[in-house]
Amino acid sequence: MPIESLKILFNRDLNKSKIEIEPNQNESDSWKIQKGKANSVGNLCLNLVEKLNTYIGAKFWKTGHIRNKALEFSF
């Protein structure tokens, strides 16, 4: 897939994530698990950032990032 196509997809999907996250204006609410959900918004954001660092940063940009999956959901 050409890099421009990837940029379009990442921008689209990250903007969708931003729309989901923004209603949590109070940071402490971001760490509360809402009824019917398995994880908090904060933990899901940490997971998303880790995946971006691992699969985009480390693979494409050779950042040397090493994922610590156990830490992602330990907060």
Image: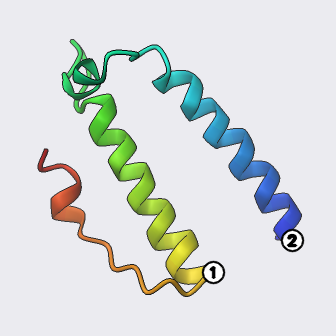
* Residues at marks 2 and 1, CA–CA distance in whole angstroms: 13 Å
**Residue located 39% across and 60% down the image:** 50
The image shows residue 1 at horizontal and vertical percentages of: 82, 70
Label of residue 60 in the image: 1
Q: What colour scheme governs how the chains and residues are painted in the rendered image of this protein?
A: rainbow
- Pinpoint residue 52: horizontal percent, then vertical percent: 51, 61
The residue under the point 43% across, 54% down is 49
Vertically, is 8 above or below 62?
above
Label 1 SS: helix
49 up-or-down from 69: above or below? above
Q: Amino acid at mark 1?
A: Phe
Q: Residues within 10 Å of mark 1 (few under 14, many from 20)?
A: few
Q: Looking at the picture, tell me which residue is in the foreground, 22 or 44.
A: 22
The quarter of the rendered structure image containing the C terminus is top left
Q: Secondary structure at mark 2?
A: loop
Checking the image for residue 13, the label placed there is none
The percent coordinates of residue 44 (x first, y second) are: 34, 40
Measuring 27% from the left and 41% from the top, which residue is drawn there? 43
Earlier in the chain: of badge 2 and badge 1, it is 2
Residue found at x 61% / y 82%: 61
On the picture, is 19 further left or further right than 22?
A: right
Label 2 neighbour load within 10 Å: few <14, some 14-19, many 20+: few
Residue 66, compared with residue 32, is above or below; it is below
Reading the image, the residue beneath label 2 is: 2
Q: Is label 2 or label 1 in front? A: 1
x and y, in percent, of residue 39 in the image: 24, 33
